[in-house]
Amino acid sequence: MCDACGANVTSDQMAMVGATSEAGRRTRQFHALCFRIWDNERHLLDRLTA
């Protein structure tokens, strides 16, 4: 399941998987497009709070 949109990530879709720096290092999974959106928002938030 995609952590961004909540839809299932099927075997015929490209997915991005990674670990967070949070305690416990929970693994996150995203559709490739959802990852790009999430990553862009994350970097924008970093710039706005710096």
Image (spheres, rainbow, N blue to C red):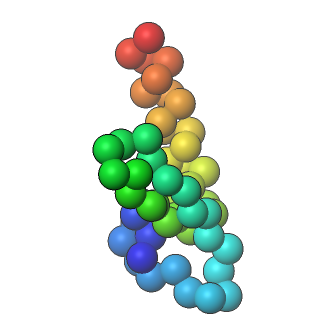
Residue found at the far top of this picture:
50
Q: Nearer the viewer, residue 30 or 34?
A: 30
Tell which residue pokes out farthest to the bottom in this image: 11
In the rendered image, which quarter is residue 23 located in?
top left
| Residue at x-position 36% and y-position 71% | 6
Please determine whether, in this image, residue 11 is positioned above or below residue 1: below
Seen in the picture, residue 28 relative to 1 is either above or below; the reply is above
Q: Is residue 38 above or below residue 15?
A: above
Q: Residue at x 40, y 51 (%)?
A: 25
Q: Residue lying furthest front in this view? A: 24
**Residue 29, position in %: x, y?**
49, 66
Q: Residue at x 38, y 15 (%)?
A: 49
Location of residue 14 in the rendering, given as x and y in whole percent from the top left corner:
67, 74
Instruction: Locate the C terminus by quadrant.
Output: top left
Q: Which quadrant would the N terminus be assigned to in this image?
A: bottom left
Q: Nearer the viewer, residue 19 or 47?
A: 19
Q: Residue at x 52, y 64 (%)?
A: 30
User: Above or below — where is 38 with respect to 1?
Assistant: above
Q: Position of residue 19 (x, y in %)?
A: 49, 53
Foreground residue among 29 and 38? 29
- The number of discs equals 0
